[in-house]
């Protein structure tokens, strides 16, 4: 698992056990816009839910994630004090030969959208294949994750933070698929020179550079702490 914490240097990791028996890894993924930071538990639980699974327990050494008690209460999860030997980890990677359009459509069944009923799916290219993501909503609207950020968090957790390729996005109920401002800021941090391919509801698509989607994104080198 690969932590990304250049602003706090906090080493934050966790494993969330799903009802299926799979363990979903999570790491802290910070953003220069601090409120967009995804904690280890936040990311792991959303990864679990995005796989059609239900979180049942959390294992995390200190430091603990922000809002850990919220996530425990939200899903009535148990706190594990130790791990079984060689837990089976969830691997999000899909093979490179996957049909992008069909996969984006198939992923819609995993969207967790009790509030909006508006599915969004994503596929993030890496050197070894595609990392999928879907939008996940929870009781606190501000703590859901968009499909794009679910995919990015999964990819960074899996060690692909320095090798993110094009990001494909599909919103079947949208007139025009387009990432929200928060996702654009996150993409600007991790893949500023890459392209985003928007797959629209009318079966057309358009391709855009991240820098063009967020021409004046927030930056600031002084925010990075020196160890």
Image: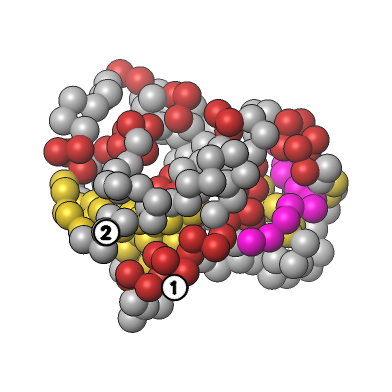
| Boundaries of the magenta span | 52-63
Q: Residue furthest bottom?
A: 97
Q: Secondary structure at mark 2?
A: loop
Residue occupied by mark 1 = 94
Relative side of 48 to 7, left or right: right
Residue 14 vertical placement versus 225 (above, below): below
Q: Position of residue 45 (x, y in %)?
A: 64, 48
User: Mark number for residue 191?
Assistant: none
Whichever of labels 2 and 1 marks the residue nearer the N terminus, that label is 1
Based on the displayed image, in which of its 4 quarters is residue 142 positioned? top right
Q: In the rendered image, is residue 68 in sight?
A: no
For marks 2 and 1, give the one nearer the viewer.
2
Question: Counting other residues with Cα less than 10 Å from the Cα at mark 2, is it few (<14), some (14-19), or many (20 or more)?
Answer: few
Residue occupied by mark 2 = 202
Question: Counting other residues with Cα less than 10 Å from the Cα at mark 1, is it few (<14), some (14-19), or many (20 or more)?
Answer: some
**Quarter holding the N terminus?**
bottom right
Relative side of 178 to 104, left or right: left
Q: CA distance from mark 2 to mark 1?
A: 25 Å
Q: Residue at x 33, y 31 (%)?
A: 181
Tell me if label 2 and label 1 are in contact, CB under 8 Å: no
Q: Position of residue 69 (x, y in %)?
A: 76, 31
Q: Looking at this view, is 13 or 172 the one in front? A: 172
Q: Residue at x 44, y 73 (%)?
A: 94
Q: In the rendered image, is residue 95 in sight?
A: yes
Relative side of 47 to 69, left or right: left
Q: Is residue 55 magenta?
A: yes
Q: Is residue 30 magenta?
A: no
């Amino acid at each position: 698992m690969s932590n990304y914490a250049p602003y706090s240097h906090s080493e934050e990791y966790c494993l969330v056990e799903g009802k299926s028996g799979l363990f979903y890894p999570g790491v802290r993924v910070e953003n220069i816009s601090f409120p967009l930071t995804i904690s280890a538990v936040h990311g792991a639980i959303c990864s679990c839910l995005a796989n059609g699974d239900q979180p049942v327990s959390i294992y995390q050494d200190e430091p603990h994630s922000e809002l850990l008690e919220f996530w425990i209460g939200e899903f009535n999860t148990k706190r594990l004090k130790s791990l079984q030997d060689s837990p089976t980890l969830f691997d999000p990677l899909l093979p490179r030969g996957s049909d992008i359009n069909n996969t984006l459509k198939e992923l819609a069944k995993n969207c967790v959208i009790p509030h909006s009923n508006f599915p969004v799916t994503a596929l993030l290219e890496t050197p070894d294949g595609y990392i999928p993501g879907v939008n996940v909503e929870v009781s606190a609207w501000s703590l859901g994750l968009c499909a794009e950020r679910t995919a990015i968090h999964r990819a960074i957790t899996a060690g692909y933070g320095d090798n993110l390729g094009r990001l494909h996005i599909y919103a079947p109920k949208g007139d025009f698929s387009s990432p929200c401002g928060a996702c654009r800021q996150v993409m600007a941090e991790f893949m500023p020179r890459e392209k985003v391919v928007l797959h629209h509801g009318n079966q057309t698509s358009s391709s855009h550079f991240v820098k063009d989607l967020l021409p004046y994104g927030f930056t600031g080198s002084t925010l990075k702490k020196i160890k």
